[in-house]
Image (tube, helix red, strand yellow):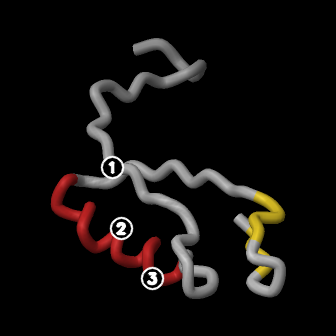
Amino acid sequence: MAYSAEAGVVISEVQLSLVCDDNQVDEVTAIIRKTGKIGPNISGWVYVTPVEQALPIGGKEN
């Protein structure tokens, strides 16, 4: 997301999807929240949800 601190508006938006082990969630979200901050206001949100399944698309059949 690009944010204009001078105008106070969002000028573009980005979505990041990341899968990690449960024991890495706190560390990963802390990094995203620290480095993704733009200006003094809320810059976005981090949503944490469980992954119920991960299924391949294409590739060789087992």
User: What residue do we see at 45% from left, 82% from top?
Assistant: 34
Mark earlier in primary sequence (2, 3): 2
**Disc 2 from disc 1: Cα separation:** 9 Å
Distance in Å between CA atoms under marks 1 and 3: 16 Å
Specify the label residue 48 is tagged with. Answer: 1
Residue 35 horizontal/vertical position (percent): 52, 82
Within 10 Å of disc 2 (Cα), the crowding (few <14, some 14-19, many 20+) is: few
Relative vertical location of residue 60 with respect to residue 4 in this rendering, above or below:
above
Amino acid tagged 1: Val
Tell me the quarter of the picture where residue 41 sits.
bottom right
Residue occupying image coordinates x 34% and y 75%: 30
* Residues at marks 2 and 3, CA–CA distance in whole angstroms: 9 Å
First in sequence, mark 2 or 1: give its number: 2
Q: Is residue 16 left or right of residue 10?
A: left
Which amino acid, mark 3?
Lys
Inspect the image, locate mark 2, and give the three-letter code of the amino acid beneath it. Thr
Q: Earlier in the sequence, mark 1 or mark 3?
A: 3
Q: Is residue 1 above or below residue 3?
A: above
Do callouts 2 and 1 mark residues in contact (Cβ within 8 Å)? yes
> Can you say which quadrant of the picture contains the N terminus?
bottom right
For the point 81% across and 86% down, the residue is 6
Q: Which of 48 and 53 is in front in this view?
A: 48
Is 45 on the left or on the right of 4, as rendered? left
Relative placement, left or right, of 9 versus 38 is right
The answer to whether 61 appears left or right of 22 in the picture is right
Q: Is mark 1 on a helix, strand or loop?
A: loop
Q: Quadrant of the C terminus?
A: top left
Report the residue marked by disc 2: 29
* Residue at mark 3: 34
Q: Which residue lies furthest to the top in this view?
A: 61
